[in-house]
Image (cartoon, helix red, strand yellow):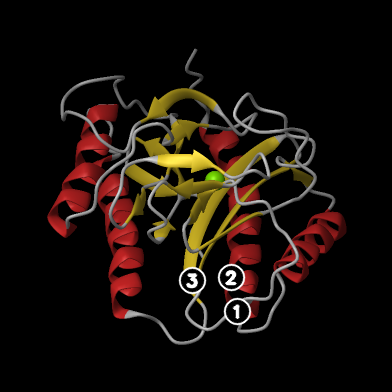
Amino acid sequence: MVELKTPEEIDRIGVAGAFVAEILAELRAAAGVGVNLLALEAIVRERIRERGAHSCYWDYSPSFGRGPFRNTVCLSVNDAVLHGLPFDYALRDGDVLTMDLALGIDGWVADAATTVIVGTPDPEDQRLVRATEEALGAAIDAAQPGNRIGDISAAIEAVARRHGYPVNTEFGGHGLGRTMHEDPHVSNAGRAGRGFPLKPGLVIALEPWFAKTTDRIFTDPDGWTIRSADGSRTAHSEHTVAVTADGPRVLTAA
Ligand code: MG
């Protein structure tokens, strides 16, 4: 069931969204060569505790993971793209790191992800990261009242195709608000003009992610981390967006 939010509820999701953006900006600045993933996890844990926010990931036990998850941020390095389980690993020069964060404040949830290249970037990795950012921008532009979910999916897919990246459709965007995952699903590929109509009050996480040379994935033996099937590098960009009568409103903007 799709639940439309009132303007007041969207504002409250925006409060959580601003906090998600603030923490992700801090993590981007902190993610240098030699920094341990567990130190990044510790930053998020502390910020959430200080604020009295609630982690959507802590104790999360979905069908696709070996629950419960006992961390507050997903950190995915290089060929890892989604649900990366923080572990004892010091970041190396040139690593591609995706940080995905969902949390709630006073019962309202926001979700965003950003990919950063640690130290010296490989130009091909930069191109991949920028493609996911470009696809996210196109997805947001398509989140107009009167459009349909398929318009968002098609916009993401068009950017991927233009850059020559394959698109996986097993994991994509989703509704959210009271919880981290609500209806509708927002595939990262699809046909314009199809699917659920975008009405004011719809709040969705849009999250294009691409692997350089494959649309296939597998789950790491850690039970959580999702990696590209061929080991190629990956990137992921995500914002929580509200469809409003005035157009899309990004609730996790920095
Ligand atoms: Mg997310």
Q: Position of residue 207 (x, y in %)?
A: 41, 46
Query: Is residue 232 placed above or below 205 in the rendered structure?
Result: below
| Rendered residue at 52%/79% (across/down) | 118
Q: Is disc 2 in contact with disc 3, using a CB cutoff of under 8 Å?
A: no
Q: Is the residue marked by circle 1 packed among few (<14), some (14-19), or many (20+) residues within 10 Å?
A: few
Would residue 141 be found to the left or right of residue 209 on screen? left
Residue type at mark 3 is Val
Q: How many marks?
A: 3
| Rendered residue at 34%/51% (across/down) | 210
Residue type at mark 1 is Ala
Would residue 190 be found to the left or right of residue 109 on screen? left
Q: Is disc 1 in contact with disc 2, using a CB cutoff of under 8 Å?
A: yes
Seen from the viewer's position, the closer of residues 118 and 113 is 118
Label 1 C-beta lies within 8 Å of the nearest ligand 1 atom: no
The secondary element bearing badge 2 is classed as: helix
Q: Position of residue 114 (x, y in %)?
A: 49, 61
Mark with earlier residue (1, 3): 1
C-alpha distance separating marks 2 and 3: 10 Å
The secondary element bearing badge 1 is classed as: helix
Q: Is the residue marked by circle 3 packed among few (<14), some (14-19), or many (20+) residues within 10 Å?
A: many
Report the mark closest to the observer, 2 or 3.
Answer: 3
Tag of residue 116: 3
Tag of residue 25: 2
